Image (spheres, rainbow, N blue to C red):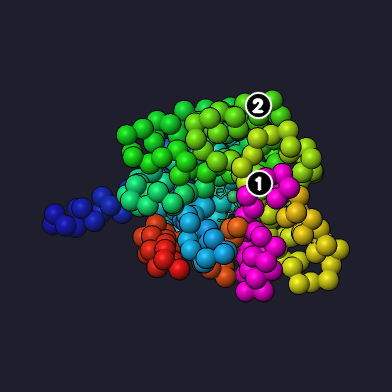
Amino acid sequence: LLPLGALMAALIVAVVAWGLRRRLSPLGELKMAVARREFVVHYQPLIELATGRCIGAEALVRWRRPDGSMVRPDLFIPLAEDSGLVLPITDQVIAEVVREMRAALVSDRDLHIAINLSAQDIRSGRVLAVLAQALQGSGIAPQQIWLEATERGFMDADAARATINRARAAGHAVAIDDFGTGYSSLSYLQGFALDALKIDKSFIDTIGAETVTSSVTPHIIDMAQALGLQVVAEGVETQAQADYLRERGVQFAQGWLFAKALPAAEFLAFARSRQAK
Ligand code: C2E
Ligand code: CA
Ligand code: CA
Ligand code: CA
């Protein structure tokens, strides 16, 4: 009789939870996901092109719903940005990165993890206090956490400059993400003290193709290098792209040629296998 009662209770809870979810708006659902800490992080390996070594990963958030399904970030980050919920989501990403990567980062000082900041994170700057708090006592060096911001984060130039300078003063490297997809030129970026530039996948896709933008890609690389920025190519899918980028002096790359974004344990196994190469 007891197991039957427990079963009934579980059934009622499930039905009520389902009903609640059904009545919630997308924003209501996202709020609930934040409250329940339903965000997980996958790690896409970053590869040093000259050696093939794995030098770290980009942390990419996913929303794991109670039914186990994974929601891609482009399906909820825009709503999270419009509603301000992206701030607590960034906090959860930071907490997850520290929890899952701490041991590996402490034992290998050459590894780093890149975390994506939204325009709101950049504008408020509050994320730096959250990060400092999370790193305190962890043994992780601030140099092992890189921060990525898209051009949208640079629209409020004064706020962006302040956050970037504070981040670098704390020891983090800062990269401009998805470069080439927005409107800002490299000369505009000279007004910010940056460490690295990530070339958007749409430019990597043109390598080897005879298109108008294929002639732009080498110029982005040359100018980034002239500005003293480290260059990361994203979305590398073919060996021909990797070879081209390496020959051009691009230091780092990520993409499906090497690995997709992986759960923590799989990423750590990948990183170990790619250490000595
Ligand atoms: P992004 O920062 O440009 O991240 C790279 C995206 O490209 C990732 O998708 C990654 O899985 C995908 N990708 C990487 N290599 C390849 C490849 O070789 N081929 C193809 N076709 N795709 C590749 P994902 O994980 O779906 O992320 C999408 C976007 O969501 C990210 O673009 C980023 O803007 C945003 N995002 C992800 N995590 C966070 C986060 O923690 N916070 C914020 N604010 N935004 C995030
Ligand atoms: Ca990114
Ligand atoms: Ca991109
Ligand atoms: Ca990117």
Task: Name the front one of labels 1 and 2.
Answer: 1
Disc 1 marks which amino acid?
Leu
The C terminus lies in which quarter of the figure?
A: bottom left
Up/down of 205 relative to 129, above or below: below
The N terminus lies in which quarter of the figure?
A: bottom left
Up/down of 203 relative to 240, above or below: above
Q: Residue furthest bottom?
A: 239
Disc 2 marks which amino acid?
Ala
Residue 174 badge: none
The residue at which mark 1 appears reads as 229
Label 2: element kind? helix
Q: Is residue 67 visible?
A: yes
Q: Residue furthest right?
A: 212
Whole-Å distance between the Cαs marked 1 and 2? 21 Å
**Residue toward you, 238 or 79:** 238
> Is residue 190 inside the magenta stretch?
no
Which residue is rendered at x = 79% and y = 40% of the image? 187
Task: Decide if residue 212 is on the left or right side of residue 5.
Answer: right
Q: How many marks?
A: 2
Q: Cβ–Cβ below 8 Å for labels 1 and 2?
A: no
Which span of residues is magenta-colored? 224-250
Q: Is residue 78 visible?
A: no
Q: Residues within 10 Å of mark 1 (few under 14, many from 20)?
A: some
Label 1: element kind? loop
Which residue is rendered at x = 45% and y = 34% of the image? 131
Q: Position of residue 68 (x, y in %)?
A: 41, 58
The residue at which mark 2 appears reads as 159
Which residue is rendered at x = 63% and y = 49% of the image? 230
Q: Position of residue 174 (x, y in %)?
A: 58, 40
Which residue is rendered at x = 64% and y = 53% of the image? 231
- In the figure, residue 252 lies in which quadrant? bottom right
Task: Decide if residue 59 is on the left or right side of residue 123.
Answer: left
